[in-house]
Image (spheres, rainbow, N blue to C red):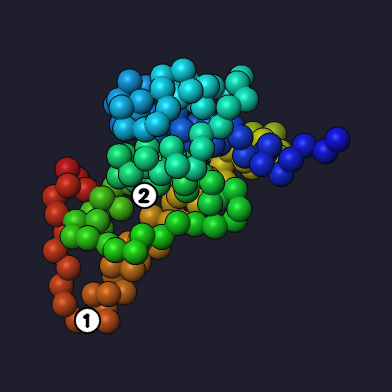
Amino acid sequence: MTAPYSHRFVPGLKTATKQAVEHVGGIDAAATISRVGRTQFSDYSNRQRDGMVPVDVALDLDHCAEKPLILAAMAQALGYVIIPQHIGAGDFGNDMSEFAMSSGDILSTAMRILDDHRIDPPEADEIAPKLSRAIHVLQRAAGIVHEVQKSGQSYVVSDKGAGA
């Protein structure tokens, strides 16, 4: 039998789930904002276990985390990138800060991957969501810049992002 399409993306989805759980304050905090308990969250994050986070639970975690960590990994598995409908004040600074950090991670991963002069499927699965996330961040930042160009109005950047 051939492995299902989704099988290649399980490690990335498990990692995204682990990041979301950590971002909301850990397994106990995640259990208070969702319909599942500690044991399930542990299984959803563990690459040695079969359980995967259900979409409704992913929505709860991502909503609490205030970023689509799991849903972005799911979208990436299908070849899509999530773009926010609204870009609020201060996002440009945050985006530039996030892009700077993700760029370092991407370059570090790329150097390790290219050490043997090839990109193997597991390596592609590892770096693809990182590249997609960086592209997404730059698309959001470009949206702000284009709005400034279109409107002719300045955009006020909060001090939350770059340099903060």
| Element type at mark 2 | helix
Question: What's the amino acid at mark 2?
Answer: Phe
Would residue 146 be found to the left or right of residue 2 on screen? left
Residue 151 is labelled as 1
Farthest-out residue, front: 35
Between residues 16 and 33, which one lies in front from this camera angle? 33
- The x, y position of residue 5, in whole percent, is 71, 44
- The x, y position of residue 10, in whole percent, is 61, 35
Query: Quadrant location of residue 125?
Result: top right
Q: Nearer the viewer, mark 2 or mark 1?
A: 1
Mark 2 → mark 1, Cα distance in angstroms = 25 Å
Would residue 113 be found to the left or right of residue 69 on screen? right
Between residues 93 and 28, which one lies in front from this camera angle? 28
Q: Please identify the quadrant where the C terminus is shown.
A: top left
Query: Quadrant location of residue 157?
Result: bottom left
Tell me, yes or no, if residue 130 can be seen here.
no
Tell me, yes or no, if residue 136 can be seen here.
yes
Residue depicted at x 61% and y 19%: 48
Residue depicted at x 17% and y 68%: 155
Question: Mark 2 — residue?
Answer: 99
Crowd band around label 1 with a 10 angstrom C-alpha radius: few (<14), some (14–19), many (20+): few
Relative vertical location of residue 102 with respect to residue 30 in this rendering, above or below = below
Of the image marks 2 and 1, the number of the one nearer the N terminus: 2
Question: What's the amino acid at mark 1?
Answer: Ser
Q: Please identify the quadrant where the N terminus is shown.
A: top right
